[in-house]
Amino acid sequence: CEDDMDVEPNDPNAFLDDEFYSQPGAYQSAIAGVYANLTLTGIRGSGSSNIQGLDAGTSQYGRSLMNLQTISTDEAIWTYENDPGIREIQRKTWSSVNPILLGSFSRIMASVAFANEFLRQSTDDLLNQRNVPQDERAEIALYRAEAKFLRALAYYHLLDLFGKAPLYDETITVGSFQGEELNRQALFEHVETELLEVLDDMAAPRTVEFGRADQGTALMVLAKLYLNAEVYTGSPRYDDAMTYIEQLLNSGYTLANDYRNNFRGDNSTNEATSEIIFGIPSNFEESRSFGPVVVMTNGGVGSIEENNEDFGLFNPGWGGAIRLTPQFVEKFDGPEFENDVRNTILSEGRTREITDVSNPDEGFVLIKYTNIRSDGTNPEYDTFTDTAFPMFRLADVYLMYAEAHLRGGGGNISQAVSLINELRTRANGATINQSDLTLDFVLDERARELYWESHRRQDLIRFGKFSGGEYIWAFKGGSASGIPTNSIRNLYPIPAQSLSTNQNLSQNPGY
Amino acid sequence: TVTDNTGIPIPGVEVSIEDTNRGTSTDFDGKFTIEVNDGESIKVAYLGYKTQIITYTGQSNLEIQLQPDQDVLEEVVLVGYGSSRKKDITGSVSSLSKEDFTKGNIISANDLLQGRAAGVNITTGGGAPGSPAAIRIRGGGSLGASNDPLIVIDGLPLENAAPGGSRSVLSTINPNDIESLTILKDASAAAIYGNRASAGVIIIETKKGTKQFQVDYNYAAGIYTRFNEVDVFNAQDFRQIISERRPGDIDELGDANTNWQDEIYRTALSADHNISIRGNLLKRIPTRLSVGHLDQDGLRLTSEYQRTNASIALNPSFFKDHLRINLNANFSQEKNRFAPAVEGAALRFDPTRPVRDPSSPFGGYFEYFTNSSSGIPTPELTVRNPVATLLQRNDRTETNRYYGNLNIDYRFHFLPEMKAVVNLGMDVGEGSGRNILSPESAQGYNSENELVGSEGFFENERRNYLADGYLNYKKDLFKDFNADFTLGYSYQRFENDGFNVGNLRDPQFSDRVEFADIDLVLVAYFARAVFNYEDKYVLTSTYRRDGSSRFSTVNRWGDFFSGAFAWNIMEEDFMQDQNTFDNLKLRAGVGQTGQQGIGPRGIYFANYEVARNVDQSNYMFGSTPIIPGLPTARNTKAQWETATTFNAGIDFAFFKNRLSGAVDIYHRETDNLYVFAGVPDGANFSNFFDQNSGTLETQGLEVELSGIIFDAKGDTDKFDWALNYNVTFMNQEITSLANNEAIRVGGVGGGTGGTIQIHDVGSAPNAFHVFNQVYDANGNPIEGAYADLDGDNVITEDDRYLYRNPMPDITMGLQSTMNYKNFDFTFNLRASLGNYNYNNVNSSNAQYNLLQQQSTVGNIPRSVLETNFQFTENVIFSDIYIEDASFLRMDNIQLGYTFKDFFNKGNNFRLYAGLQNAFVITDYSGLDPEIFGGIDNTIYPRPRTFLVGANVNF
């Protein structure tokens, strides 16, 4: 009877690993699991989460990027400061006990853990042991490359946000192992090496389904890595950035004709698929989470406007969760932006200034992401969405070209101006001249083109304007008018729990 | 024939011939037959009576009358795998027999225990009929693992989870069938139940069959009324406050005058019938048959609870009582209608709006809606009419539970000191339910935005099988030195599976989703030795080796020991001449118990979970959803949590037993504490998992006193008054935790994912974690202004501090019983001191900005007038909402009158009337201070009940 204690799962949806991987299609299901960490918080619905210590939806990968790269900047004000941690993020007063920081660090490191598990479970030895048919092996090899890429992508995000990370690879047994710390220099090199190694094993650009990573995605991360290298390591690598930017320009991506198609309900199937280099997919019926697009649609509905139908939402939204700082609104000040399709700001009946964060009627709002499809049909969805979150898209590459050029990375000025003007023309906006193209212009233009796409904090840091006193916006440093902040805030602190569970990690300076 | 001092035959008396192996016991008529030679000594022994030794001189018939042993305080106490004389008890044990049970509105077994034993704290979840109660014996002692005591009914350990659709584990058991309740509090008493005994053990013994024919009938009827409400603005004051604070919203107001809290409740009725018949079936099998039916409506509209019980107990014995068989078979059917919690909506809903609105498209109930562009009435995003929420939903369940056991007790013919006991038990609960929302409901939209209502259903079956057995050998090894050995084995298996369908009327949620828990298998070997010298010194030692399928083969087994010693000072020679004490006994013991009741089963598995359709948790490759398979967090090192308890106690009785009682002190240390705590990021498939890391120390002092104030000495014409009082002092402190990292717990309403409590080293569990409110010179709180405790000039999470906790410092219970002539009068008082609540009703509602309720206006608590707070976000974690929730509650008062010899001699007919939950004295500002866990989000109000009833026996 003692043998009876050797129990096994009884649930029809649970398996021991060998049993799971011996089923047909298991490896596709497993790589989908690694990808799923980008959009799902758990596999028991949008309220479930494999990351704890905060609300399930807040731990979503793209939501973490949104909180740390968008809400922390001049692009947005979050009304509900009783949502744990958000007050400190948007006022730049966070500490290492902030639950959003823990959720973000843990969620991104989970991608590393899931990718490692896929690599452990898909070795040739195990494929042979499990009698996986030969004709599936090429696809599995591609999945392995994608798993390695997703691991590198996660480390890239940690490099940018936290400046360090513990090293885990597929040789480490699942348990409580404490990975060695990679400092920012070492982490930079690690991401660089991993991406360069995996690049050739990945699918050619635009040859796999939307939602999967290909060489184009890897090129984009490399380009971003080098563009920000000076911030990450102190050594500029703008020429390397330009190399990968130019490769991307020649990889067959094209701008969508309609800027707004990038953010519509069918952006994973409409013409935007030629512009979006990598998007985190979402699907109303099949794949639900409280990801960034769900938040920016429901949260975008104005408290005064009650304009949920403009977002393709059947429900009335979240009472005005997200508004704009006056400093962001200024980026669209001026007659040349009146007809710019990127300018979706609603100001009627609202004050530009926000005196009390809790009052959703103060401050302007805008409409960026919607559920409405490119043909104008409105599905009137309830809360969730089909709209993918465009993590990387071609317009960003255009702007990166101009910046890398201006920072001495090579290329030529006329190409830079022409790329910018392509974006402007598409947006129905005024074109610029060569003399207009300055670094400050690029930063503002990036805000206009790429707001709410989780680039802003990284951009402001690269331009020296995130911390310190050079650029002040509402509620920066805490108060309504804003105050300078300490430069330590260019990096987030390692979450207290992550430090205490892994003795190899050290805290970032100043925290 | 053996009889007691009143001449009534005593069955089961041990009869043996000294210095031989010959022995027997008396049958149900007190008769025995034994082979005996002239000059041999016949020893006749029975617990609670003085042993007699008769030298045989050739009599053919012996009439032996046993005299009660004055030294023994009557009872035999169940100790797990056997029983013991109270005199021999070495651990901390409280027991209640049916004579001592709380009278009143007893719906569930926990009602019998509430406030009755020191160290046992019972908090019901609210006033819903059959509402589950949190039972904590000495505070439990775990953080992440279960703190529920092990409940053993007639030797069958129950599972703490109830089958789907049942109100609670105990709610299916008919309290009228219970003979006695025994609580094993310290480890030396509980260690024999090793693996599940860390949080204490409650042993329930049901009533048995007898030879005498007797019929008992009990009837009780109750009227349930509400006696308190959350203080929100009435219609008139609400109009006033809106005109002052939100003049632009004046036209949002209606012209009705509605108290929504009055509208969602009603005065409810209950009726409870129980009949039991006892007698000698086929002139051979003592039998008890009982049938009960309880029908109770809840205070909240639509809430219903019906329970039907049938039990049979067969207690025959064979071969001159060498073989005894106890068969208990029980059937219980519970039919419920659950009423959704609408307290929050009731206090928020605009009091100037009516309940009903003839023009409403939503079934004639007032709702906020707009006519959308397509002309279809679309509910606005705001609070829904709570009366409609109740009346438009029909959520019914039915649970059939079959439980019972077969106990075979054989005393060896050739070795009467030895007996073998085999116990086979099972508990199968089948639950099913259907939850229908009317298509007229404003909440009745499916995910395709069709107003079709909803219809979900489920089935669930929980099964629990037990097989255990033990050998017991009891013998006088030397003169006056008795030894009692027990050696046993236990096997128990728990299974749980079923399916549910989320919503038949929604194509996205209409799938049948099957679920099945991993089986739980528990195997144990146990041994106990009790040595008794001259009844003065008693030494008990137990050992138990436990295996649980929750752990990998490496950590599967746990070994648990205990040892305890008792000194019956009364038996000493030097006590024979004194008159002060009637009982004096010292006890001391130490023991270990284990805990494996952690959340997930199979935590050590290399487990993969695959998303189910209904969860909509796929990943899209282009337009193709791919079902993801994800590994789950695993802990291959999970092992037993172990509690070590030291307990010392004294039992005493003075003044000819008119004052008796016990005092116990204990210290318990729980090691390898189960906590849900951090794991290095990247090392596993989550950032938290269940792990053994931490230590929790609990210490306490418990006093139980029984006093006879007026002793009528059995003369019913005299006034008789007895009091039972118990008091518990307890303190808990976490002394270490995984990675020294505090654990946030206690989710609150208002905001997304906020927590108000924390487990931290150096503090009690669940300490409130709050900001320190700053007040102005006039003593008024300044909104959002908090003490900058870390001195960094900004208020951040780091400025939250630990302040108070929900656990009482002192709890007390007092029961008074008076009898005079044919009248009886009892009451039960219960007090809790030093327990604090977080008033989440106020913290998430009492701010002026909530006068706007999404697209409409909304009511808020009047306490906003004291704080003048504007925004919830600014104040929700303020310590202003931590309130002292000490209370004194009159649980029940009852007056009865008995008509003696009503039908004929020996028959009684008793009528009674009582008041349940008569009053509560407290400073707490919320609805009810008694909130398990200390976070008050409004509860289902506990009703005040007026009860009348009758007991008849003939």
Image (tube, rainbow, N blue to C red):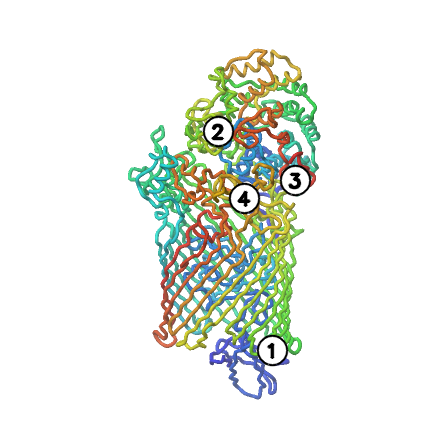
Query: Which residue in the structure is indicated by mark 4?
Result: B772
Marks 1 and 2, how far apart in space? Answer: 84 Å
**Residue B643 position in % (x across, y down):** 62, 57
Confirm whether circles 4 and 3 share one chain. Answer: no
Chain for mark 4? Answer: B
For the question of whether residue A150 can be seen, the reply is: no
**Could you classify mark 4 by the number of other residues whose Cα lies within 10 Å: few (under 14), some (14-19), or many (20 or more)?**
many
Letter of the chain that mark 1 sits on in the rendering = B
* Residue B432 in the image: above or below residue B310: above
In front of the other: label 4 or label 3? 4
Cα distance, mark 1 to mark 3? 64 Å
- Which residue is the site of mark 3? A499
Residue corresponding to mark 2: A354
SS for tag 1?
helix
Q: Nearer the viewer, mark 1 or mark 2?
A: 2
Going by the numbered disc 3, the residue's amino acid type is Leu
Both labels 4 and 2 in a single chain: no
Quarter of the rendering occupied by the C terminus of chain B: bottom left
Q: Is residue B880 visible?
A: yes
Tag shown at residue B575: 1
Q: Label 2 to label 3, Cα distance in Å?
A: 36 Å
Please state the horizontal and vertical placement of residue A40, each as a whole percent of the image.
Answer: 54, 35
Residue B329 picture location, percent across and down:
47, 62
Q: Nearer the viewer, residue B651 or B412?
A: B651
- Provide residue B22's location: percent of width, then percent of height: 60, 79
Q: Amino acid at mark 4?
A: Asn
On screen, residue B96 versus residue B893, left or right, reads right
Residue A411 lies, with reference to residue B909, above or below; the image says above
- Looking at marks 1 and 4 on the same chain, the residue that comes earlier in the sequence is marked by 1
Is label 4 in a helix, a strand or a loop?
A: loop
Q: Earlier in the sequence, mark 2 or mark 3?
A: 2
Q: Amino acid at mark 2?
A: Ile
